[in-house]
Every structure is written in C-alpha cells, then in structure tokens.
Image (spheres, helix red, strand yellow):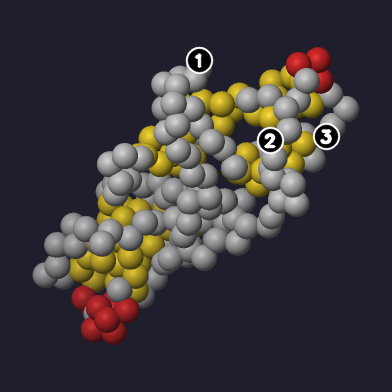
Amino acid sequence: MRRKLFALIIVTFLLTGCSPKSEHEIDLSYFYWNGKTYGLDKEDPVEVEVPKENIGEKVGEIHFQVVESDDNDNKQFIQIHNGEITLEVYSIKGEDIDEKISVNHVVYKGEVERVHVDWVDAISWDKKTYYYDREQTALITEQHIHNELGEISFTVTNSEQEDNPQYQLKDGEATFVPEGTTVYSIVDEEVNKYIFAQGKVYKLEE
C-alpha cells in the first residue's frame, strides 16, 4: 500500500451536491490558513452564519485540489497552494483575523487546536518521494556514494511549515535532512530506486 507523505489529512470533504460557485459542495470542518489552524468551535461545533453586514474585507483565499480515494463513490479534497477549488476568506467586523474569520459566511475560530505533525523521514527528488531505509543504511556507507545529484533546498522541521499537516514536499525538499545537504547516487544502484544523503539511504516507495 502506498504511504502518504503527510502524516494526516485534516481537511476532508464530501461530495454532497452542487453549489453556485462550483460543481462540488464542500463540508468544511477546519483548515490551515495564514499560519494558523481555523475551525468550528469544538464545544459547540455548529456552523454560525455571519450576517452580511458584519462581513469585512477579503483577506485571502484557501485552495483545494480533488484527489481520488479508494472509494469510487467519494473523493477527498486536500489543501494545496494551487488547487481546483478556491474559497475566499473574509474578516469579520470588530474581530481580529487571528481570532475569527469568515469563509462561506461561516465563523471559524483561530487556533482551535494546536496541531503536531509526526513527519516521516523523506526526501522529494526528481518529482519522486524517497523514504529513509534503515536496512540499506546499515549496509551502505559513504564509500558507496557515486555522483552528486544536487542539494536539499528546504527542510520542513524547524520551519514555519512544521505544524502544517497539509504541507506537501516540493522537489528538492526534505522533512528532516538539513537544507544545503548534498544528495548522491549510490554505486551500482539506480537513482530511481535509491539516493543517499546525510549518511542515510532513501528508497523510492512505489
């Protein structure tokens, strides 16, 4: 079974019908925006509609993409920067946007729950995702490294994206390997199967 890079998907949506803005109606529980997690009130998780006269200025957007699920009757939506569905975020008059915002005329509270993401040790390279392989690391040392492939361009841990469960690695990024670390090929191993970085072997998982 293919392992997903992100530890969990917080934003889950259901196909429940049609809406004027798109062909999908979205059941939105909570989401990550502007460095914070926003959601319905946990103690009273009922959608509270914001009166039209109380809606302030547009302050941003949330973008989602449809992805196929194992269930043919349903699809999932995951939050990314460039998606197929866009929701507009508005301020609420008299409220700090760090505390409350409006999406689809519904009130969402900021920091409803502090999210901790348990990232797997992975590298995105050449548009593929490689995962730390403990067994191969015990067998392969720096004596087996071959050509330099490039350097890690960004590390998720200890960055502003560390607690963002919707963040997906871009090409050249890693969850733990430090930025600037050189990535190597391995002697007698195909690059589309193994790579080497920071003394560890990473294996492509199909």
Three-letter amino acid code of the residue under disc 2: Glu
Image quarter of the N terminus: bottom left
- Where does the image place residue 52, in percent across and percent down from the top left? 76, 16
Res 184 seen here: no
- Where does the image place residue 201, in percent across and percent down from the top left? 30, 72
Which residue occupies the foreground of this view, 157 or 146? 157
Look at the numbered disc 1 and give the secondary structure of its residue: loop
- Of badges 1 and 3, nearer the viewer stands 1
Quickly name the residue at label 2: 47
Above-or-below relation of 117 to 111:
below
Whether residue 135 sits left or right of residue 96 in the image: it is: left
Which badge, 1 or 2, comes first in the chain's sequence? 1
**Label number found at residue 96:** 3
Whether residue 99 sits left or right of residue 206 in the image: it is: right
Three-letter amino acid code of the residue under disc 1: Pro
- Where does the image place residue 145, in percent across and percent down from the top left? 24, 71
Q: Residue at x 56, y 26 (%)?
A: 87
Look at the numbered disc 3 and give the secondary structure of its residue: loop
Q: Residue at x 61, y 51 (%)?
A: 160
Mark 3 closeness class: few <14, some 14–19, many ≥20 residues within 10 Å: few
Please give the count of numbered marks on the rendered protein.
Answer: 3
Which residue occupies the foreground of this view, 81 or 8? 8
Quickly name the residue at label 1: 20
